[in-house]
Amino acid sequence: MSKKRLLILTSTFPRWPGDHEPPFVYELARRLTDNWEVHVIAPHSAGLQTKEQFSDVTVHRFHYAPAMWENLAYQGGMLARLKQNPLRYLLLPLFLLSALITARSVIKKHNIDLIHTHWLLPMGLIAALLKFSKIHRGPVLCTSHGGDLFALRGKAARLLKRFSIKMCDYVTVVSNAMMDPIIELGADQDSIQVIPMGTDLEDLFTPPETPANPDQLVFAGRLVKKKGVNTLLDAFKVVIQAKPQMKLYIAGEGPERAALEAQASELTIIDNTHFLGGITQQKLATMFQKSACAVFPFTVSDDGDQEGFGLVIVEAMGCGCCVVASPTPATRDILEDGRNSLLVDQKSPEQLASAILKLLDDEKLRHKLAQAGRAEIRKHFGWQSIADRYNTLLQTLHKHDSQIKR
């Protein structure tokens, strides 16, 4: 029996296996190939091939400008790239048009049965236009990851998000905190499901064989305002005053990096602070395994942007690394203060420093939190269970569509 054909639309996709770009869509795509013929449409960027194979996944990358100007995606995500340089908004019409043309070609050539689009904007809009224009006549599943839902609150963006949701047959969100906001945008409550992001908790993000370094802290994530790294640096200044030997490793890239490096210099903590840039998943796992504590001082940005889920927290906990974090609505699905983590108020360097020092001074508490965190996340966030849930949903949507067309 031949496989049905699935088209995935995404605005970020690894540029090569092991790349430091967010791996969720790539990992999901390759895990669906047992049941689906999977095609991915993603933006092109300098140095990439227009068409390539990752495992059994066929990737089609669309050009939307000369190579030197194709900088809307990757390197921190589209929203961060637009905030960094508003002139990039001029590229959006070309981006949308090129994505639409490429999607039309792939749909016709490969006789696509179902579309799974990631992020309401911009790729959800592309899927909606394909459905509205009847270029694609099959089901559309849209997954919202958080930034696309919470940010971009202007009237035009809201209308476009409503249109994207209206044209989709089903919507998934990555945390319970996203349910009410997406329903407010017009999603049918009976056609929404919470499916968190998955990660490799069996072979990659696993506890270390040797004890972690008690003098090492780590943060990982895109360097954007909602991650709260500026608060972490202020807190680390206090930590160093008590423990001058401490080192802080910051893994990630983004538009705030230069400002954060300048802040570290101004605070005179630059010698103890190491900006690693984007690193591979393997190196990230090693960083978590070696660190006494992982710190995630998430916050809600002025424009409303916030974490949709916080997969990097799951990855840290999978490595047996205890966590200090600031709670946001999405992280309530993962963290509980005093049981599997320590939680502090947002934008509070004093509380953050106090919690970090508490963990550094109490090895038994670190062990207790790490053990509880590892045990809990293995039940809910392993890749096999997440991929199975998506496969079941996709199969159900296709079966229902086939019955309607008979």
Image (cartoon, grey):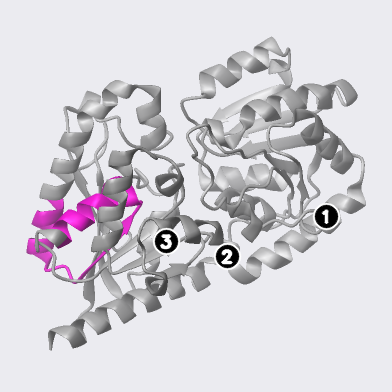
Camera sees residue 164? yes
For the residue labelled by badge 1, is the local secondary structure a helix, a strand or a loop? Answer: loop
Which of the 4 quarters of the picture holds residue 55?
A: bottom left
From the viewer's perspective, is residue 192 above or below residue 399?
above
Residue in the image at 67% along x and 45% along y? 288
In the picture of the structure, the residue carrying the numbered disc 3 is 183
Q: Mark 3 or mark 2, which has the lower sequence index?
A: 3
Depicted 326 relative to depicted 117: above or below: above
Foreground residue among 145 and 70: 145
Magenta residues, as a range? 102-131
Q: What is the count of numbered marks?
A: 3
Query: Which residue does the numbered mark 1 point to in the structure image?
Result: 338
SS at mark 2? loop
First of labels 1, 2 by sequence position: 1
For image coordinates 51% across by 36% down, the residue present is 222
Q: Residues within 10 Å of mark 3 (few under 14, many from 20)?
A: some
Q: Amino acid at mark 2?
A: Phe
Nearer to us of marks 3 and 1 is: 3
Residue placed at 92% from the left, 45% from the top? Answer: 362
Q: Amino acid at mark 1?
A: Gly
Residue under label 2, please give it. Answer: 381
